[in-house]
Amino acid sequence: MAPALSDISSALNIQPEESQIALSIFILAFAFGPLLLGPCSEFSSGDLQISFPVLSDCWKPDQRGKSFALATFIPLLGPAIGPIVGGVITERIGWRWLFWVLAAFDAFLIFLTFIFFRETHGQTILRRKARKLRQQTGRNHRTDFELSSPSLPRRLRVGLTRPYRLLITQPILQLLSLLLAYNFGILYIVLSTFATMWIDRYHQSQQSSGLNYLALVIGYTIAAQIGGPATDAIWARLKQKHGGSTRPEYRVPLMIPGVLLIPAGLLIYGWGVQQKLSWAVPDVGIGVFGCGNILATQAMQAYVMDAFAEHTASASAASQFLRNVFAFAFPIFAPRMYASLGFGWGNSLLALMFLAMGVPGPFVLWRYGERLRRMGKPQQ
């Protein structure tokens, strides 16, 4: 949709800030949807959107790096590839067709989900197996979970309120949510203004402007290829070094290159545009930014998965709430910020704020992570 924002603004006679809301408001649903869907997956079948608990069900901690890199890479790949397709659709058949194409593609994905998506929750699989054995043998086969399971109303009450309680009572989750939120807020500032920048500053067509998102795809791909194996290798080495004990902090080292690459990429991208350098300079900057974004996100989400192993879905939903609110809100002020400061100083401001917030994050988690987890109120 990003390449079509100028056409949408002209057709509907709205200001740039209002068109940014049209682009980013769907992310607001991402903030509230998982708060319901996440806990539901802990007492029923998982949903396709709840990727983190599925990974937790299917892979052991020392095997999650590669799978988690892929699960982090693909959702972020969509906003990078989407503008390429969107630019072609807008230029060839008009911006209104963007929504028809997306609706048809979503319907196709839902159809595939019903065919190929299977249950991964261990307790649910055992419960179904016990029910099948009861039907076949007539014996009263029950799982331990069924024998000690509370009533459905209580499970609903506890499950549906757990994400809120986790976010309110767990300092470690609050810190991670804030880091993820600012990370994604900056990402969506870049995603929402990238195509229009190429049209306004470099006078490219809508179709050509979308192709520059390939630089972001390249950065994502490099990070996913490096980050997955590196995560598993670091985790295994630290586990061996500490006599076989494991801690969520073993995921933190991968955050360090991520939080350094993000501001570096912002500066290269911003000043490359400000000085009107070759198109390659902003693209290199956006690739570096994308690489850092994947590495930092992967490490922080893996930390959440390890720290809240029993309630992965609810903890993931809680951590995603604030990040999606920021991703919705940040693009709204992006046009005015760049109009006032320019891309050079605007991105310098974002990079400086990220350095102040993001760089101390890995060191705080490494040194005080265990203490922060102990400070949290135990969950039912």
Image: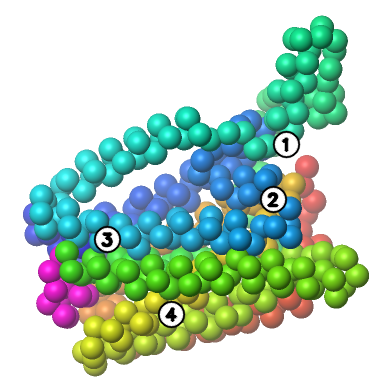
4 and 1 marks in contact (CB < 8 Å): no
For label 1, the SS is helix
Which of the pair 30/77 is nearer the observer?
77
Q: Earlier in the sequence, mark 2 or mark 1?
A: 2
Residue at mark 4: 288
Q: CA distance from mark 3 to mark 2?
A: 33 Å
Q: Where in the figure is residue 41, as x and y percent of width and height?
A: 61, 37
- On the image, the x and y values in percent for residue 46 come to 59, 37
Where 32 falls versus 240 (above or below)?
A: above
Highlighted range, magenta: 197-206
Q: How is the rendered protein coloured?
A: rainbow
Instruction: Identify which amino acid the numbered label 1 is placed on.
Output: Gly
Taking the spot 73% from the left edge, 53% from the top edge, the residue there is 60
Identify the residue shown where x is 55% and y is 79%.
Answer: 259
Residue located beneath label 2 in the image = 59
Residue 130 % position (x, y): 77, 20
The secondary structure that dominates the magenta segment is: helix
Determine the residue positioned at 67% across, 76% down.
Answer: 253
Amino acid type shown at disc 4: Val
Q: Quadrant of residue 235?
A: bottom right
Q: Earlier in the sequence, mark 3 or mark 2?
A: 2
Quadrant in the rendering for residue 360: bottom right
Whichever of callouts 4 and 1 sits on the residue coming sooner in the sequence is 1
